[in-house]
Image: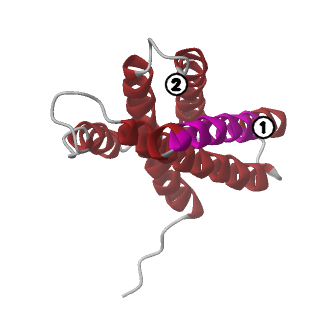
Amino acid sequence: MLIHVSRDAHLGTYLNDHLAGATAGVELIRRLTVAERATDYGPELRRLAAEIAEDRRSLLDLVERLDLPRARHKALLAWAGEKVTRLKLNGRLLFRSPLSRVVELETMRLGVEGKAACWRTLRQRAVGDSRLDVLELDRLLERAEEQSGTLERLRARAITEAFG
């Protein structure tokens, strides 16, 4: 027996998966911002944290605009998963390792690249769907690309500091 799943149902699943990732990303960038607040990484990370939180709100707005159901359990699991990753061993018991910065920046960059892919997907879907604003999606995509560049610059610097 075949079960028919609508395109909007697929889109809902897709966007809820991205919303879960965005939830984890907001938590990770907040943790990174707090850990780096007294370093020269702090100002750029604070700006990124504000933008990434705003991007998550934009995704929430899109889910509502498309009248798609929210899978709150996915966001909750992503939130909890981010908390669990804090328990990983980084070679230091009491203090933050330079390796933590590298891995967290890499993780954030991967997340931002995934977010950019989501904006591209929605941009493609926007053709013929009046519920999606092409200019808004272009702006979100441009910002994601800028965020990725910033994270890569920070990551490259962190690699030098961690590994010489």
| Image quarter of residue 124 | bottom right
The magenta stretch is: 141-160
* Residue sticking out furthest to the top: 38
**Residue at figure coordinates x 47%, y 47% from the top left:** 163
Judged left or right of residue 139, residue 54 is: left
Residue 157 belongs to the span the image colors magenta: yes
Query: In the image, what residue type sits under mark 2?
Result: Ala
Query: In the image, what residue type sits under mark 1?
Result: Glu
Neighbour tally class for label 1: few under 14, some 14-19, many 20 plus, Cα within 10 Å: some
Most foreground residue, 14 or 113: 113
* Residue sticking out furthest to the left: 93
In primary-sequence order, the first of circles 1 and 2 is 2
The rendered magenta stretch, by its main secondary structure, is classed as: helix
Q: Which mark is residue 142?
A: 1
Are the residues tagged 1 and 2 within 8 Å (C-beta)? no
**Residue at figure coordinates x 75%, y 39% from the top left:** 137
